[in-house]
Amino acid sequence: MFYPEADIWYRNLPNSPLGDLLSNNISVPGLSPLYSHVHCNEHGEICQITIGESEINAATTMMAFVLSGLFDLTKAYFISAGIAGINPKLGTLGSVALAKFSVQVALQYEFDAREMPLNFTTGYLSYGAYAPNEYPSILYGTEVMEVNEALRDAAAELARRAELADSVDTAEYRAEYRTGGEVYSAATDSPSVIRCDSATSDVYFSGALLSEAFENTTKLWTNQSTITYCMTAQEDNAILEVLMRAAVWGIVDYSRAIAMRAGSDFDRPPPSTSAFQHLRLLDQNGFGIAIENLYLAGVEIVKGIVFQWDTIYDKGIKPTNYIGDIIGTLGGEPNFGPGSLFNGIGVSLDSGTDVGLTKRRSLTGGKAGGWK
Protein backbone atom coordinates (compact mmCIF):
# COMPACT_ATOMS: atom_id res chain seq x y z
CA MET A 1 0.00 0.00 0.00
CA PHE A 2 2.92 2.33 0.73
CA TYR A 3 6.69 2.36 0.43
CA PRO A 4 7.83 0.49 3.58
CA GLU A 5 5.59 -2.45 2.69
CA ALA A 6 7.17 -2.58 -0.77
CA ASP A 7 10.78 -1.83 0.13
CA ILE A 8 11.06 -4.92 2.32
CA TRP A 9 10.44 -7.02 -0.81
CA TYR A 10 12.91 -5.05 -2.93
CA ARG A 11 15.65 -5.49 -0.34
CA ASN A 12 15.09 -9.12 0.57
CA LEU A 13 13.76 -10.97 -2.46
CA PRO A 14 17.14 -10.94 -4.28
CA ASN A 15 18.48 -13.07 -1.40
CA SER A 16 15.87 -15.75 -2.18
CA PRO A 17 15.66 -18.09 -5.18
CA LEU A 18 12.89 -15.89 -6.62
CA GLY A 19 15.05 -13.12 -8.09
CA ASP A 20 15.05 -9.33 -8.06
CA LEU A 21 11.75 -7.46 -8.31
CA LEU A 22 13.56 -4.46 -9.78
CA SER A 23 14.78 -6.40 -12.82
CA ASN A 24 11.84 -5.08 -14.86
CA ASN A 25 10.13 -1.77 -14.14
CA ILE A 26 7.02 -1.20 -16.25
CA SER A 27 5.18 2.11 -16.53
CA VAL A 28 1.41 1.73 -16.48
CA PRO A 29 -0.99 4.62 -17.21
CA GLY A 30 -3.28 5.42 -14.31
CA LEU A 31 -1.12 4.19 -11.44
CA SER A 32 -0.51 6.37 -8.40
CA PRO A 33 1.79 9.32 -9.21
CA LEU A 34 3.80 8.24 -6.15
CA TYR A 35 4.22 4.65 -7.39
CA SER A 36 4.01 4.70 -11.18
CA HIS A 37 5.65 1.36 -12.03
CA VAL A 38 4.92 -2.32 -11.76
CA HIS A 39 8.08 -4.16 -10.72
CA CYS A 40 8.78 -7.72 -11.88
CA ASN A 41 11.55 -10.26 -11.53
CA GLU A 42 13.72 -11.24 -14.51
CA HIS A 43 11.29 -13.65 -16.20
CA GLY A 44 8.09 -11.97 -15.05
CA GLU A 45 6.79 -14.79 -12.84
CA ILE A 46 6.48 -12.42 -9.87
CA CYS A 47 5.40 -8.79 -10.02
CA GLN A 48 4.75 -6.17 -7.36
CA ILE A 49 2.63 -3.03 -7.40
CA THR A 50 2.30 -0.35 -4.71
CA ILE A 51 -1.26 0.88 -4.93
CA GLY A 52 -1.25 3.77 -2.46
CA GLU A 53 -3.26 4.12 0.73
CA SER A 54 -7.06 4.39 1.08
CA GLU A 55 -9.90 2.96 -0.94
CA ILE A 56 -9.75 5.53 -3.75
CA ASN A 57 -6.05 4.98 -4.39
CA ALA A 58 -6.45 1.22 -4.19
CA ALA A 59 -9.40 1.08 -6.58
CA THR A 60 -8.00 3.45 -9.20
CA THR A 61 -4.55 1.86 -9.23
CA MET A 62 -5.83 -1.70 -9.34
CA MET A 63 -8.33 -0.94 -12.09
CA ALA A 64 -5.65 0.79 -14.16
CA PHE A 65 -3.39 -2.23 -13.67
CA VAL A 66 -5.87 -4.97 -14.58
CA LEU A 67 -7.25 -3.07 -17.58
CA SER A 68 -3.86 -2.01 -18.93
CA GLY A 69 -3.57 -5.03 -21.21
CA LEU A 70 0.17 -5.16 -20.50
CA PHE A 71 -0.01 -8.34 -18.42
CA ASP A 72 -1.58 -11.77 -18.83
CA LEU A 73 -3.41 -12.09 -15.50
CA THR A 74 -5.71 -14.99 -16.33
CA LYS A 75 -3.82 -17.42 -14.07
CA ALA A 76 -2.18 -14.89 -11.76
CA TYR A 77 -2.40 -15.14 -7.99
CA PHE A 78 -2.91 -11.84 -6.16
CA ILE A 79 -1.63 -11.26 -2.65
CA SER A 80 -2.64 -7.98 -1.04
CA ALA A 81 -0.09 -7.43 1.70
CA GLY A 82 -0.26 -4.56 4.17
CA ILE A 83 0.17 -3.68 7.82
CA ALA A 84 -2.88 -3.18 10.01
CA GLY A 85 -4.33 -2.53 13.40
CA ILE A 86 -4.98 -5.83 15.15
CA ASN A 87 -7.79 -6.88 17.47
CA PRO A 88 -6.20 -7.96 20.80
CA LYS A 89 -8.97 -10.51 21.26
CA LEU A 90 -7.67 -12.52 18.30
CA GLY A 91 -4.02 -11.64 17.72
CA THR A 92 -0.98 -9.63 18.68
CA LEU A 93 1.61 -7.25 17.30
CA GLY A 94 3.55 -8.90 14.48
CA SER A 95 0.93 -11.57 13.82
CA VAL A 96 0.05 -12.24 10.18
CA ALA A 97 -3.60 -12.78 9.29
CA LEU A 98 -5.16 -14.37 6.21
CA ALA A 99 -8.79 -13.33 5.70
CA LYS A 100 -11.84 -15.08 4.32
CA PHE A 101 -14.07 -11.99 4.56
CA SER A 102 -13.31 -8.33 4.08
CA VAL A 103 -16.06 -6.04 5.34
CA GLN A 104 -16.52 -2.37 4.45
CA VAL A 105 -17.54 -1.47 7.99
CA ALA A 106 -17.70 2.30 7.59
CA LEU A 107 -20.30 2.09 4.82
CA GLN A 108 -23.06 3.06 7.25
CA TYR A 109 -24.98 5.96 8.71
CA GLU A 110 -23.06 7.69 11.48
CA PHE A 111 -24.24 9.79 14.42
CA ASP A 112 -21.87 11.63 16.69
CA ALA A 113 -21.98 9.36 19.75
CA ARG A 114 -23.06 12.36 21.87
CA GLU A 115 -26.24 12.59 19.80
CA MET A 116 -27.13 8.93 19.36
CA PRO A 117 -30.28 7.46 20.96
CA LEU A 118 -29.82 6.43 24.58
CA ASN A 119 -30.45 2.76 23.80
CA PHE A 120 -27.77 2.65 21.06
CA THR A 121 -24.36 1.11 21.75
CA THR A 122 -22.70 2.91 18.84
CA GLY A 123 -23.24 5.84 16.52
CA TYR A 124 -22.97 3.54 13.49
CA LEU A 125 -26.14 2.23 11.90
CA SER A 126 -26.52 0.04 8.81
CA TYR A 127 -28.18 1.72 5.83
CA GLY A 128 -31.94 1.40 6.06
CA ALA A 129 -31.79 0.13 9.66
CA TYR A 130 -33.31 1.58 12.83
CA ALA A 131 -31.06 -0.11 15.41
CA PRO A 132 -27.36 -1.09 15.42
CA ASN A 133 -28.08 -4.84 15.36
CA GLU A 134 -30.21 -4.70 12.18
CA TYR A 135 -28.97 -5.90 8.81
CA PRO A 136 -28.73 -3.21 6.09
CA SER A 137 -31.76 -3.05 3.82
CA ILE A 138 -29.93 -0.74 1.39
CA LEU A 139 -26.85 -2.23 -0.26
CA TYR A 140 -24.18 -0.75 -2.50
CA GLY A 141 -22.78 -4.21 -3.32
CA THR A 142 -19.28 -3.75 -1.89
CA GLU A 143 -20.12 -4.25 1.79
CA VAL A 144 -18.77 -7.81 2.07
CA MET A 145 -16.22 -9.59 -0.11
CA GLU A 146 -15.52 -13.30 0.38
CA VAL A 147 -12.45 -15.06 -1.02
CA ASN A 148 -11.56 -18.69 -1.67
CA GLU A 149 -11.35 -20.28 1.78
CA ALA A 150 -9.44 -23.33 0.54
CA LEU A 151 -6.77 -21.10 -0.99
CA ARG A 152 -6.73 -18.96 2.17
CA ASP A 153 -6.09 -22.08 4.25
CA ALA A 154 -3.36 -23.29 1.89
CA ALA A 155 -1.70 -19.87 2.02
CA ALA A 156 -1.83 -19.91 5.82
CA GLU A 157 -0.07 -23.27 5.90
CA LEU A 158 2.63 -21.96 3.59
CA ALA A 159 3.01 -18.80 5.70
CA ARG A 160 3.46 -20.92 8.84
CA ARG A 161 6.77 -22.13 7.42
CA ALA A 162 8.18 -18.70 8.29
CA GLU A 163 9.98 -17.93 11.53
CA LEU A 164 8.31 -14.65 12.40
CA ALA A 165 10.19 -11.73 13.89
CA ASP A 166 9.60 -10.39 17.40
CA SER A 167 11.25 -7.86 19.70
CA VAL A 168 11.66 -7.18 23.40
CA ASP A 169 10.08 -3.73 23.07
CA THR A 170 7.03 -5.16 21.34
CA ALA A 171 6.66 -7.83 24.00
CA GLU A 172 6.69 -5.16 26.71
CA TYR A 173 3.74 -3.32 25.18
CA ARG A 174 1.63 -6.39 24.55
CA ALA A 175 2.23 -7.46 28.17
CA GLU A 176 0.06 -4.47 29.16
CA TYR A 177 -2.97 -6.47 28.00
CA ARG A 178 -2.51 -9.15 30.68
CA THR A 179 -4.58 -7.11 33.12
CA GLY A 180 -7.50 -7.43 30.69
CA GLY A 181 -7.87 -11.11 31.53
CA GLU A 182 -8.72 -14.05 29.29
CA VAL A 183 -10.42 -11.94 26.62
CA TYR A 184 -7.04 -10.45 25.71
CA SER A 185 -4.93 -13.60 26.07
CA ALA A 186 -4.13 -13.63 22.34
CA ALA A 187 -2.63 -10.15 22.65
CA THR A 188 0.05 -11.38 25.05
CA ASP A 189 1.24 -14.25 22.84
CA SER A 190 4.16 -14.19 20.40
CA PRO A 191 3.44 -13.38 16.73
CA SER A 192 1.86 -16.17 14.70
CA VAL A 193 -0.05 -16.80 11.49
CA ILE A 194 -3.80 -16.63 12.10
CA ARG A 195 -6.99 -16.89 10.07
CA CYS A 196 -9.49 -14.09 10.65
CA ASP A 197 -11.14 -11.24 8.81
CA SER A 198 -10.41 -7.63 7.88
CA ALA A 199 -12.48 -4.47 8.33
CA THR A 200 -12.07 -1.83 5.62
CA SER A 201 -12.47 1.84 6.49
CA ASP A 202 -10.82 4.98 5.15
CA VAL A 203 -11.13 6.34 8.70
CA TYR A 204 -8.19 5.24 10.85
CA PHE A 205 -10.30 4.29 13.86
CA SER A 206 -8.94 3.43 17.28
CA GLY A 207 -10.39 2.68 20.70
CA ALA A 208 -12.51 0.00 22.32
CA LEU A 209 -15.92 1.47 21.45
CA LEU A 210 -15.37 1.81 17.70
CA SER A 211 -13.45 -1.46 17.46
CA GLU A 212 -16.19 -3.37 19.24
CA ALA A 213 -18.82 -1.71 17.06
CA PHE A 214 -17.01 -2.90 13.93
CA GLU A 215 -16.51 -6.35 15.42
CA ASN A 216 -20.28 -6.56 15.64
CA THR A 217 -20.75 -5.13 12.13
CA THR A 218 -18.45 -7.79 10.70
CA LYS A 219 -20.21 -10.55 12.60
CA LEU A 220 -23.66 -9.28 11.56
CA TRP A 221 -22.97 -8.62 7.90
CA THR A 222 -21.17 -11.95 7.32
CA ASN A 223 -23.85 -13.93 9.19
CA GLN A 224 -21.35 -15.50 11.58
CA SER A 225 -21.92 -16.59 15.18
CA THR A 226 -18.54 -15.53 16.56
CA ILE A 227 -16.24 -12.52 16.27
CA THR A 228 -13.87 -12.96 13.32
CA TYR A 229 -12.70 -9.39 12.72
CA CYS A 230 -9.01 -9.11 13.59
CA MET A 231 -7.36 -6.66 11.20
CA THR A 232 -8.10 -3.11 10.13
CA ALA A 233 -7.61 -2.10 6.50
CA GLN A 234 -8.07 0.91 4.26
CA GLU A 235 -7.86 -0.90 0.92
CA ASP A 236 -9.00 -4.54 1.04
CA ASN A 237 -12.60 -4.22 -0.19
CA ALA A 238 -11.45 -1.93 -3.00
CA ILE A 239 -8.80 -4.40 -4.16
CA LEU A 240 -11.15 -7.34 -4.07
CA GLU A 241 -13.96 -5.43 -5.79
CA VAL A 242 -11.65 -4.59 -8.71
CA LEU A 243 -10.52 -8.21 -9.02
CA MET A 244 -14.10 -9.41 -8.93
CA ARG A 245 -15.20 -7.00 -11.66
CA ALA A 246 -12.21 -8.02 -13.78
CA ALA A 247 -13.14 -11.66 -13.22
CA VAL A 248 -16.58 -11.02 -14.72
CA TRP A 249 -14.78 -10.22 -17.99
CA GLY A 250 -12.35 -13.15 -17.75
CA ILE A 251 -9.34 -10.90 -17.13
CA VAL A 252 -8.47 -12.50 -13.78
CA ASP A 253 -9.54 -15.50 -11.74
CA TYR A 254 -11.07 -14.16 -8.51
CA SER A 255 -10.60 -17.52 -6.79
CA ARG A 256 -6.84 -16.76 -6.81
CA ALA A 257 -7.05 -13.71 -4.53
CA ILE A 258 -5.34 -13.74 -1.11
CA ALA A 259 -5.83 -11.02 1.51
CA MET A 260 -2.99 -10.79 4.05
CA ARG A 261 -2.30 -8.30 6.85
CA ALA A 262 0.31 -7.99 9.63
CA GLY A 263 -0.47 -6.31 12.94
CA SER A 264 1.58 -3.15 13.49
CA ASP A 265 -0.57 -1.71 16.30
CA PHE A 266 -3.54 -2.73 18.43
CA ASP A 267 -6.92 -1.32 17.42
CA ARG A 268 -7.78 -0.50 21.05
CA PRO A 269 -5.73 0.32 24.14
CA PRO A 270 -4.85 -1.95 27.04
CA PRO A 271 -6.69 -1.41 30.34
CA SER A 272 -5.84 1.84 32.15
CA THR A 273 -4.61 3.51 28.95
CA SER A 274 -6.70 6.10 27.11
CA ALA A 275 -7.49 5.76 23.42
CA PHE A 276 -5.61 9.01 22.70
CA GLN A 277 -2.50 7.93 24.60
CA HIS A 278 -2.57 4.57 22.86
CA LEU A 279 -2.90 6.01 19.36
CA ARG A 280 -0.81 9.17 19.50
CA LEU A 281 1.53 9.22 22.50
CA LEU A 282 2.77 5.70 23.21
CA ASP A 283 5.06 3.68 20.95
CA GLN A 284 3.71 0.17 20.56
CA ASN A 285 6.91 -0.85 18.74
CA GLY A 286 4.97 -3.03 16.32
CA PHE A 287 5.67 -1.32 13.00
CA GLY A 288 9.09 -2.83 12.35
CA ILE A 289 8.18 -6.44 13.06
CA ALA A 290 4.90 -6.12 11.14
CA ILE A 291 6.77 -4.99 8.02
CA GLU A 292 9.31 -7.76 8.46
CA ASN A 293 6.69 -10.46 9.05
CA LEU A 294 4.67 -9.29 6.08
CA TYR A 295 7.65 -10.29 3.96
CA LEU A 296 8.66 -13.40 5.92
CA ALA A 297 5.17 -14.91 5.69
CA GLY A 298 4.45 -13.54 2.23
CA VAL A 299 7.58 -14.89 0.60
CA GLU A 300 6.72 -18.39 1.83
CA ILE A 301 3.37 -18.11 0.08
CA VAL A 302 5.05 -16.89 -3.11
CA LYS A 303 7.63 -19.68 -2.99
CA GLY A 304 4.91 -22.25 -2.45
CA ILE A 305 2.96 -21.03 -5.48
CA VAL A 306 6.00 -20.78 -7.75
CA PHE A 307 7.69 -24.04 -6.75
CA GLN A 308 4.46 -26.06 -6.72
CA TRP A 309 3.04 -24.47 -9.84
CA ASP A 310 2.98 -27.60 -11.99
CA THR A 311 1.54 -29.86 -9.28
CA ILE A 312 -0.98 -27.59 -7.55
CA TYR A 313 -1.26 -23.94 -8.48
CA ASP A 314 -1.36 -23.95 -12.28
CA LYS A 315 -4.78 -25.60 -12.24
CA GLY A 316 -5.82 -23.59 -9.18
CA ILE A 317 -7.40 -24.54 -5.87
CA LYS A 318 -11.11 -25.02 -6.32
CA PRO A 319 -13.20 -23.04 -3.82
CA THR A 320 -15.58 -25.03 -1.63
CA ASN A 321 -17.29 -21.88 -0.33
CA TYR A 322 -19.19 -19.08 -1.99
CA ILE A 323 -16.81 -16.45 -3.40
CA GLY A 324 -17.54 -12.88 -4.46
CA ASP A 325 -19.59 -9.96 -3.20
CA ILE A 326 -22.78 -9.57 -1.19
CA ILE A 327 -25.03 -9.50 -4.29
CA GLY A 328 -23.85 -12.63 -6.13
CA THR A 329 -22.07 -10.98 -9.06
CA LEU A 330 -19.92 -14.04 -9.89
CA GLY A 331 -22.73 -16.54 -9.43
CA GLY A 332 -23.76 -18.73 -6.54
CA GLU A 333 -25.71 -17.76 -3.44
CA PRO A 334 -23.97 -15.84 -0.65
CA ASN A 335 -24.94 -17.13 2.79
CA PHE A 336 -25.06 -13.57 4.04
CA GLY A 337 -27.12 -10.61 2.89
CA PRO A 338 -30.39 -10.79 0.97
CA GLY A 339 -29.12 -13.40 -1.49
CA SER A 340 -28.05 -13.17 -5.10
CA LEU A 341 -29.50 -10.31 -7.14
CA PHE A 342 -28.70 -12.35 -10.26
CA ASN A 343 -30.74 -15.48 -9.49
CA GLY A 344 -27.63 -17.42 -8.53
CA ILE A 345 -26.13 -17.38 -12.03
CA GLY A 346 -24.13 -14.17 -11.78
CA VAL A 347 -24.20 -11.01 -13.85
CA SER A 348 -24.86 -11.50 -17.56
CA LEU A 349 -22.68 -9.60 -20.02
CA ASP A 350 -25.14 -10.39 -22.81
CA SER A 351 -28.12 -8.69 -21.19
CA GLY A 352 -28.87 -5.08 -22.01
CA THR A 353 -30.86 -4.67 -18.81
CA ASP A 354 -29.45 -3.12 -15.62
CA VAL A 355 -30.85 -4.74 -12.50
CA GLY A 356 -29.74 -2.03 -10.07
CA LEU A 357 -32.79 0.21 -9.99
CA THR A 358 -35.33 -2.61 -9.72
CA LYS A 359 -33.38 -4.56 -7.14
CA ARG A 360 -32.68 -1.56 -4.97
CA ARG A 361 -36.34 -0.61 -4.90
CA SER A 362 -37.24 -4.15 -3.87
CA LEU A 363 -34.72 -4.10 -1.02
CA THR A 364 -36.06 -0.84 0.41
CA GLY A 365 -39.67 -1.88 -0.03
CA GLY A 366 -40.44 1.35 -1.86
CA LYS A 367 -40.25 3.38 1.35
CA ALA A 368 -39.81 7.12 1.21
CA GLY A 369 -36.20 8.01 1.64
CA GLY A 370 -35.20 4.53 0.61
CA TRP A 371 -32.29 5.73 -1.49
CA LYS A 372 -30.40 6.72 1.63
Image (tube, rainbow, N blue to C red):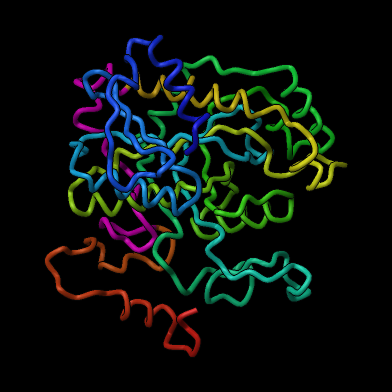
Image quadrant in which you'd find residue 68: top left
Q: Is residue 244 left or right of residue 123?
A: left
Image location of residue 207, percent across then percent down: 73, 49
| Rendering quarter of residue 231 | top right
Q: Residue furthest bottom?
A: 368
Image coordinates of residue 124 in percent, x first then y, are: 64, 66
**Magenta: predominant secondary structure element?**
loop
Up the image or down, 24 lies above or below 90; here it is above
Q: Residue furthest front?
A: 33
Residue segment shown in magenta:
305-334
Q: Residue at x 49, y 90 (%)?
A: 368
Toward which corner of the image does residue 333 lie, by quadrant?
Answer: bottom left
Looking at the image, which is closer to me, 36 or 146? 36
Q: Is residue 60 magenta?
A: no
Which residue sits at x=40%, y=43%?
A: 33
Position of 37 compared to 170: left or right? left
At a point 83% along the width and 46% down the height, the residue shown is: 274
Q: Is residue 37 above or below residue 144?
A: above
Observer-nearest of 51 and 100? 51
- Asked if the stretch drawn in magenta spans residue 308, the answer is yes
Name of the residue lying farthest toward the left: 350
Q: Residue at x 32, y 33 (%)?
A: 38
